Image (cartoon, coloured by chain):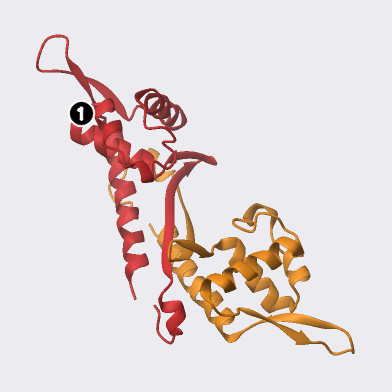
Chain colours: A red, B orange
């Protein structure tokens, strides 16, 4: 992509941000995708929140359980369908949160675009 | 890209923002690219500023000559080379602004990435 580009411009770093919208409203950006990935990995919203890298919070403005919970509710409201669900734990009284089938597909779709975008930014 | 995607997720609109950085500092985003395109077209910073669409100002926070001028100076300072230059006009005392060779190449490079990004966002 950088054929015949002056040397100075070859040192530029291409950057991009990616997100999904529905009817003009945010559905999922990088912060939300990392949250879903964390929930899928740890089976817990609070663990997922703790795993969020501070410099990539994006629309997950605050790395707190409270914010994450409100964020997920808003996304589900906009989609009109649940993306997370409660799961019974191994021990009595314990439990966690998992992605629904829709939540998993949403995350997968986001990661597909993210992968393509990464390719675009790194190709010469 | 959307093979086997649930119908609900097919309605999502993929969106992206693209920009160039150098040493962690912003060099050119969509607003700046539109400004450069306008200067190339109209041969005038103030005409270019007037042509900027209000909803796509991006890093061109204010659509004013003053802001545009300061913005261009900052980009040139960060690049260490001029991207615009004064041009003598047809009539005595008149004049305008044009892109330097580097400015043209920078705009061209931005537009190449923008085109690829558009393809990525519209492919199914």
Q: Residues within 10 Å of mark 1 (few under 14, many from 20)?
A: many
How far from the left and from the top, in percent, is residue B79?
52, 74
Camera-side residue of A108 and B34: B34
Name the residue nearer the viewer: B57 or B1: B57
For residue B89, say whether it is visible.
Answer: yes
Query: Residue A16: x, y in percent?
Result: 43, 58
Residue in view at x 42 percent, y 51 percent:
A18
Residue A100: x and y in percent read: 26, 30
Percent position of residue A110, x then y: 34, 47
Left-right relation of B70 to B4: right
Q: Quick one: B71 or A98, which is closer to the camera?
A: B71
Q: Judging from the image, what secondary structure is the residue with disc 1 in?
A: loop
**From the image, which quarter does the C terminus of chain A lie in?**
bottom left
B56 relative to B109, above or below: above
User: What residue is at 60 percent from the left and 55 percent from the top?
Assistant: B58
Q: Which residue is mark 1?
A: A43
Residue B1 seen by the camera = no
Give the tally of numbered discs. Answer: 1
Residue B73 location, quadrant: bottom right
Q: Residue furthest right?
A: B92
**For residue A61, which quarter of the picture?**
top left
Quarter of the N terminus of chain A within the rendering: bottom left
**On the picture, is B106 further left or further right than B4?**
right
Residue lying farthest to the left in this orientation: A90
| Chain of the residue under the numbered disc 1 shown in the image | A
């Amino acid at each position: 992509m950088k054929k015949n580009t002056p040397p100075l411009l070859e040192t530029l770093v291409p950057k991009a941000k990616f997100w999904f919208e529905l009817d003009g409203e945010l559905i999922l950006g990088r912060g939300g995708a990392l949250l879903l990935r964390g929930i899928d990995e740890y089976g817990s919203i609070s663990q997922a929140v703790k795993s969020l890298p501070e410099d990539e919070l994006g629309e997950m403005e605050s790395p707190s359980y409270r914010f994450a919970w409100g964020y997920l509710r808003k996304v589900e409201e906009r989609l009109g369908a649940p993306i997370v669900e409660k799961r019974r734990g191994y021990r009595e009284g314990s439990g966690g949160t998992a992605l629904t089938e829709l939540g998993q597909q949403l995350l997968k779709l986001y990661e597909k675009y993210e992968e393509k975008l990464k390719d675009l930014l790194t190709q010469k």
